[in-house]
Image (cartoon, rainbow, N blue to C red):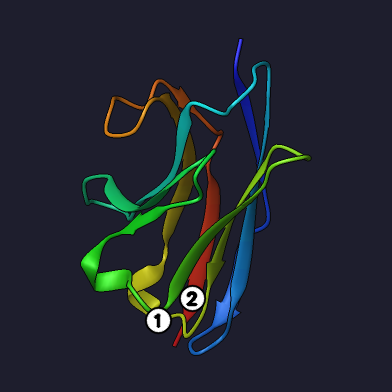
Amino acid sequence: QVQLVQSGGGLVQAGGSLRLSCAASGSTFNNYAMAWFRQAPGKEREFVGAISWSRGSTDYADSLKGRFTISRDNPNNTLYLQMNSLKPEDTAVYYCAAGYGWGTEYNYWGQGTQVTVSS
């Protein structure tokens, strides 16, 4: 069974940076896509970006390109989300997710981690 365990997050001032981690276990992930989503209070869950585990190709929400970067450490099965130039509107609970194949449904989810950006 695939398990995703998140770490990182917390409180940061506007303009600062944070890195989230997501440790994956329970499978070999060569054919998986891994992604980050976020959900702010009172809003729907929003796609942040995704990465192909084998190829390393990425896709981002247009509004986040240039500030957020997704990467992975294949040997350690860890996914990262580097967030720079953070804004108060980036405040949300962030989730990592995994799905078999690119462009398919994400069936596995991390527990979520709070990111709060103060102005």
Q: Amino acid at mark 2?
A: Val
Residue, far top: 1
Could you tell me which residue is drawn at 64 percent across and 21 percent down?
Answer: 28
Could you tell me which residue is drawn at 27 percent across and 33 percent down?
Answer: 103
Label 1, residues with CA under 10 Å away: few <14, some 14-19, many ≥20? some
Pointers 2 and 1 in contact (CB under 8 A)?
yes
Can you say which quadrant of the picture contains the C terminus?
A: bottom left
Position of 59 compared to 68: left or right?
A: left
Q: Position of residue 57 (x, y in %)?
A: 43, 52
Q: Position of residue 62 (x, y in %)?
A: 22, 68
**Residue nearest the observer in this picture, 106 or 57:** 57
Instruction: Say above or below: 4 vs 45.
Output: above
Cα distance in 3D space between marks 2 and 1 = 6 Å
**Residue nearest the observer in this picture, 56 or 9:** 56
Q: Where residue 10 is drawn, which disc sits there?
A: none
The residue pinned by badge 2 equals 117
Can you say which quadrant of the picture contains the N terminus?
A: top right
**Residue nearest the observer in this picture, 90 or 22:** 22
Q: Earlier in the sequence, mark 2 or mark 1?
A: 1
The residue pinned by badge 1 equals 87
Instruction: Say above or below: 58 vs 112.
Output: below
Position of 95 compared to 23: left or right?
A: left
Q: Position of residue 37 (x, y in %)?
A: 38, 47
Helix, strand or loop at disc 1? loop
